[in-house]
Image (tube, rainbow, N blue to C red):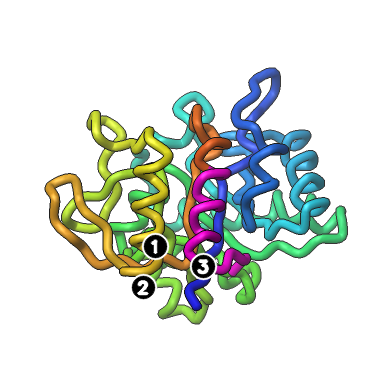
Amino acid sequence: MHKVDLNCDMGESFGAYKIGNDEEILKFITSANIACGFHAGDPSVMNRTVKLALERKIAIGAHVGLPDLVGFGRRVMDISSKEAYNMTVYQIGALYGFVKAEGGIMKHVKPHGALYNMAAKDSALSKAIAEAVYKVDPELILFGLSGSKIIEEGEKIGLRVANEVFADRTYTDEGTLTSRKQKNALIKDADKASTQVIRMIKKCKVTSIDGNDIDIKADTICIHGDGTKALEFAKKIKQDIQKQGIKIEAI
């Protein structure tokens, strides 16, 4: 039987700004990647989101990003491997405190946005992130772009890894995500997204923007919580996956 984790980026509100519909989306996922205050989130939002996830018995992970609230962590920054290591340790520690205080256990770590895409192609950056995760807690699972450098470096250091694929994004022939600067980067139709997801799980294939089939492994499916149709996508994808007899559970 096929099985898959369904994850969503959460806790991305901060201060007076509300982003996403965390409380509703939590009804349809199995893992929550909670922002740690660098690209989004703040202490109050982190605390609230952790509590909501624990109430629903959803696996919690640290969503570590670049220090870029204004750009939502989606702008490339020139950082060293040491900086990547320190940023990762710092953010894991911040969320770990809230999870521990509520009697929970952190399960995974997932880079966000530009850091995620940079690490997917950069072995040195990926190694630094993986090392940070391992040194904080070798039991943590490292989420990364399916088949990318961060998956390779996570495995090398001895971490459990989860190959992540995206419900609402398109792919290049290289297996990377299409840049958000391109018009066809996002999938806005729930049916199309669901069809892509099921094919990635069952056939281990995805069609690139150039129409070519590429190999892909789907351990966990991401739905972006800040998307305008995130809740609709979460409902539709969960329903369609279950209809296919695919089991949905946390990694």
Please report the residue visible at 62 percent of the width from the left and 41 percent of the height from the top: 10
Q: Earlier in the sequence, mark 1 or mark 2?
A: 1
Residue 18 spot, x, y in % from top left: 65, 23
**As displayed, is residue 22 above or below residue 122?**
above
**As displayed, is residue 181 above or below residue 129?**
above
Q: Which residue is mark 2?
A: 152
Please report the residue visible at 38 percent of the width from the left and 45 percent of the height from the top: 193
Q: What residue occupies the far top of the structure in this picture?
A: 16
Residue 27 spot, x, y in % from top left: 69, 47
Quadrant of the rendering where the C terminus is positioned: bottom right
Name the disc covering residue 126, or none: 1
Q: Earlier in the sequence, mark 2 or mark 3?
A: 2
Magenta range is: 234-251
Q: What secondary structure is found at the residue carrying circle 1?
A: helix
Q: Give amino acid for label 3.
A: Ile
Q: What secondary structure is found at the residue carrying circle 3?
A: loop
Q: Give amino acid for label 1.
A: Ser
